Image (spheres, helix red, strand yellow):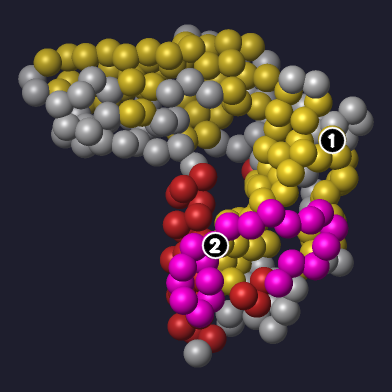
Amino acid sequence: MKRFMRILALAMLAALVVSTLPAMAATKGKTPSIVSETLYAGTSTYYMTVKNWSWEAKDVVVTSSNPGVLKVNNRSQFRLTPKKAGKAKITVKFKLNGKVKKISKTFTVKKYPNAIKSLKINDHSVKLTGEDRLRHYENPDYDDETCTVSLVPGDGWTLASVKSSGYDAHTGEKRAAKIKNDTAFPVSDFAAVSITYTLKKGKETFKYTVNVERDCY
């Protein structure tokens, strides 16, 4: 039973993660376009979103006008690493239907805002480095009925909302709800759940995600 729940949890968490990450949406016949988003320096690899991308494209080459700000991890893939604050134009050159095409978009990389002073899950603190500066993956024990996430906003930041989105462990249906910070959350009801914290400072908004998958081993 635990093995089955583990497989179910992995599949559902993957669905949650994919739904929150950039994607390459393919629409036949339409011109591909890069979606520009604000990135943060010193965080993990970013997967660039390209709308209307055709998987039939060949000889793909991705370049950055300013690799010191935004580095291309692989010239044939859409993986970027934000290095420091600034702007960089990302260009994708490719061949489609025998024709060479090129699309570009300028990205803004901002200094990491330090919107979170501390993050604690159950009885341990999360070190906010690398990917954990944007999102964290937690694996509570299968027998744990609840999970408590305690987030303390950084100086000048306020917590605007906390929302959960997950899959019912019994029916497999997707469920969404507003929850409270620093309050026990009933993870036993879910195979996998994603908790999104929205923080604000003036006109600036920062979102942080905690993905919880119960350890079914």
Residues drawn in magenta = 167-186
In the image, 207 versus 48, the foreground residue is 207
In the image, 190 versus 22, the foreground residue is 190
Q: Residue at x 38, y 22 (%)?
A: 34
| Vertical comparison of 137 with 91: above or below | below
Query: Please, what is the three-letter code of the amino acid marked with disc 1?
Result: Thr
Q: Report if residue 215 is visible in the image.
A: no
Query: Please, what is the three-letter code of the amino acid marked with disc 2?
Result: Arg
Q: Residue at x 79, y 56 (%)?
A: 180
Query: In what element is the residue under mark 2?
Result: strand
| Vertical comparison of 73 with 9: above or below | above
For residue 175, which numbered disc appears in the image? 2
Query: In what element is the residue under mark 1?
Result: strand
Outermost front residue: 177
Q: In this rendering, would 18 be left or right of 59? A: right
First reached walking from the N terminus: tag 1 or tag 2: 1
Whether the residues at callouts 1 and 2 have beta carbons within 8 Å, the answer is no
Coordinates of residue 161 in the picture (x, y in percent): 74, 44
Coordinates of residue 91 in the picture (x, y in percent): 38, 15
Task: Please name which of the two marks, 1 or 2, marks the residue nearer to the observer.
Answer: 2
Q: Is residue 172 magenta?
A: yes
Q: In this rendering, would 153 be left or right of 57? A: right
Q: Residue at x 31, y 36 (%)?
A: 25
In the image, 18 versus 40, the foreground residue is 18
Q: Residue at x 58, y 57 (%)?
A: 176
- The residue identified by callout 1 is 158
Mark 1 Cα shell of 10 Å, populated few (<14), some (14-19), many (≥20): some
